[in-house]
Image (cartoon, rainbow, N blue to C red):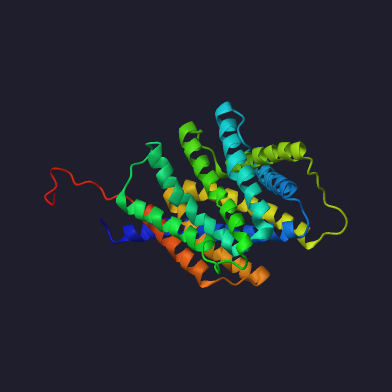
Amino acid sequence: MTGTEPRDGTHALLWPTVLLVVSALGWGILYSFNRLATTDGIPFIPYVFWMGTGAAIILLVFGAVFRTLPRLSWEHMRGYLVLGTISFGMTYTVLAFVAPKVPAGVLGLGATLTPILTYPAAALFRMDRFRAIRTVGLVLGVGGVALVVVPETSLPSRDMAPWVLLSFVGPVLYVANALIISWLKPPPDGALPLAGGILATGAAFMFVVMAATGQWWWFEGPMTDGDWALAAAAGTTALVFYLMVEIIRLAGPVFFTTVNFMIPLTGIGWGVLFFGESHSYWIWLALVLMLAGLFLVNRPAAPRAKASDPAS
């Protein structure tokens, strides 16, 4: 091994790390955009529809320019449909619905739960095996949730606790999405076409939901703060979905999961900046427990020693 190899490896991860930080800032600010738009009077279902539509248009235009539009084979369309419906349509509908009712920084804590909950789900369906260290991480994550919703003084109002629990449906949907995709095994695709296909099908799903519920809404009159938040959310969604695919392509899915360590912190930071939010020590303790649980769940399993290994 030469002395340049570790440095080369470090350089190889430098650009993905930059993208990861940008991605975390983007995911974190979406909680604040959701709150700004929905508290300004935009109904949550049309909000998600227009956010997905705007993001899809941005990515499809770039895809047309660079000649990397989504592929229309059944295998690709099936992947777009599952990812767009669950990871965007359903998940963002839940987050937009609870956005006016819970501080944006508290909603950001849910990001830690996706990898924590993926572990028991994968083990249950025999896609992974139970490990003691990961089980401890799961317990810490559940303990963090309890610290958010159980103590009387953890939230500004006790009436927020049910809405916080409802917001955690979002991480559960992400887990279901990951398991389904692992079963379907969609063919690989580039970042632009995959992200564009996901958001286009997600927006189409939300159009059906909007039509079924009769929650029609359109930009009317001069642009308000909520309208600008919606426009910003559309651009940010296009960016973070593109970055998600690109980071996974460059550095792998395990590297990308580290974004979940940063999203709660960026979500809290943006909440402070936009709304002047402050949090009780229960919330900070919950964050510590959740991040510790995330760390333990994400720890790779130690390789088994071979029979010929002298150390065995």
On screen, residue 2 versus residue 243, left or right, reads left
Q: Is residue 74 above or below residue 199?
A: above
Q: Is residue 210 above or below residue 43?
A: above
Quadrant location, the N terminus: bottom left
Depth check, front residue: 52 or 107: 107
Q: Hey, which residue is sitting farthest right in the picture?
A: 221
Is residue 154 shown to the viewer in this render?
yes
On screen, residue 184 versus residue 140, left or right, reads right
Q: Quadrant of residue 280?
A: bottom right
Number of numbered discs visible in the structure rendering? 0
Q: Position of residue 26 (x, y in %)?
A: 60, 58
Q: Position of residue 13 (x, y in %)?
A: 43, 57
Query: Residue at horizontal 68%, vertical 44%?
Result: 56
Is residue 19 shown to the viewer in this render?
no
Q: Position of residue 198 (x, y in %)?
A: 61, 40
Q: Position of residue 270 (x, y in %)?
A: 61, 66
Q: Hey, which residue is sitting farthest top in the picture?
A: 74
Depth check, front residue: 83 or 253: 83
On screen, residue 184 versus residue 302, left or right, reads right
Depth check, front residue: 166 or 204: 166
Query: Residue at horizontal 74%, vertical 60%?
Result: 39
Query: Residue at horizontal 11%, vertical 50%?
Result: 310
Query: Residue at horizontal 56%, vertical 34%?
Result: 79
